[in-house]
Amino acid sequence: YFPVRAGGDLAVMHGIAKALFALDDAAKADPSRERVLDVGFIETHTNGFEAFEQAVRAIAWTDIERESGLTRADIEGVAAVYAQAKASILIYGMGLTQHRYGVDNVRMICNLALMRGNVGRPGAGICPVRGHSNVQGQRTVGISEKPELVPLDRLDAQYGFSAPRTKGLDTVGTVEGVIDGSVHAFIGLGGNFVRAAPETERLEAHWKDLALTVQIATKLNRSHLVCGRTALLLPCLGRIEKDVQRSGEQCVTVEDSTTCIHASFGTSEPASDQLLSEPAIVAGIARAWKPDDTRVPWQAWVDDYGLVRDAIEATYPDQFRDFNARLHTPGGFPRPVGARERR
């Protein structure tokens, strides 16, 4: 265990890369030794490597030690272990992503994996640990504030409406909108937005100015205690609870950190027989808003979640081919990812 200085992650990873270059230099000088860098992989599957190498070699160890809070010997020891591993999975949590240099941190993790060819082969890869069970899966099925990432034309054709083409708000944009008054309502499907978002104190101060806040949740958290002028707290079934609808017991689907998609069944009895599922709540809001609009089969989707999966397959036929049929594959079925196949 190496206690990295807060904010020192980039320095540590640059130090590991610098040590890997030094180990590779030593291997090149001895023909009997195997190279540390995966030269063939780098030449075939990466770009910009020379500039990256030059930048890393130029960093002084004194700067790395000061910023990381670790000694050169510590970092070189980590690099030596990594260099000896035949395959490595690089796992990172939200501590690396939820701050100013989160994107740079993830890019550097990728660089370390690419240096050793730890992408697209058995036992190797990059694995993010998410803060919620399906943060990754929601993006896969088109939940995004960026319209260019969603097959809007296909959705228009499927459901007979024109989806908005204007860009929505991400987390930072939402926080800024609450603070400056341009956001008037908030509906949260799980999560602890007020506490998890940046600028928590400023956000809490302005949260009470929202006309409406709706929290759909499985358990209480701080965000439920900070309310808009009208506030609703809607408890729902948790993923560990049995979900029985008109067609029988239901399962939901999750995409794990290795981009494998699999079924998830609840095993516990619900905390109350009055709890609704998340799909039932969302569909209920939609039906109450447009009671005479039959273009989207909201009630049928609530009755049988398999129909939701059929709809996902129709929207993303390549990624979700035979969705319901493959759902119970042991370990899940992998979503097509170019990096896994070295494409």
Image: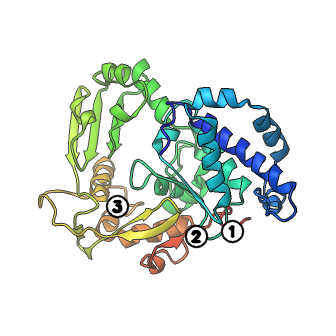
Q: x, y percentage for residue 45?
A: 79, 58
Q: Which residue is mark 3?
A: 298
Of callouts 2 and 1, the N-terminal one: 2
Q: x, y percentage for residue 115?
A: 73, 53
The quadrant of the image that shows the C terminus is: bottom right
Residue drawn at x 22%, y 47% is 219
Q: Is residue 6 left or right of residue 188?
A: right
Of callouts 2 and 3, the N-terminal one: 3
How many C-alpha atoms fall within 10 Å of the one at disc 1: few (<14), some, or many (≥20)? few
How many C-alpha atoms fall within 10 Å of the one at disc 3: few (<14), some, or many (≥20)? some
Compare residues 235 and 64 and report the one nearer the observer. Answer: 64
Residue drawn at x 73%, y 41% is 18
What count of labels does the image hold? 3
| Position above or below: 231 against 129 | above
Q: Is residue 187 left or right of residue 97?
A: left
How many C-alpha atoms fall within 10 Å of the one at disc 2: few (<14), some, or many (≥20)? few
State the colouring used for the structure image.
Answer: rainbow
Element type at mark 3: helix
Whole-number angstrom distance, CA of label 2 to CA of label 3: 21 Å
Whole-number angstrom distance, CA of label 2 to CA of label 1: 19 Å
Q: Which residue is mark 1?
A: 341
Compare residues 73 and 111 and report the one nearer the observer. Answer: 73
Whole-number angstrom distance, CA of label 3 to CA of label 1: 37 Å
Residue drawn at x 58%, y 70% is 317
- Callout 2, which amino acid? Pro
Q: Quadrant of residue 177?
A: top left
- Callout 3, which amino acid? Trp
Q: Disc number at residue 219? A: none
Of callouts 3 and 1, the N-terminal one: 3
Q: x, y percentage for residue 329?
A: 46, 79
- Callout 1, which amino acid? Glu
Q: Disc number at residue 317? A: 2
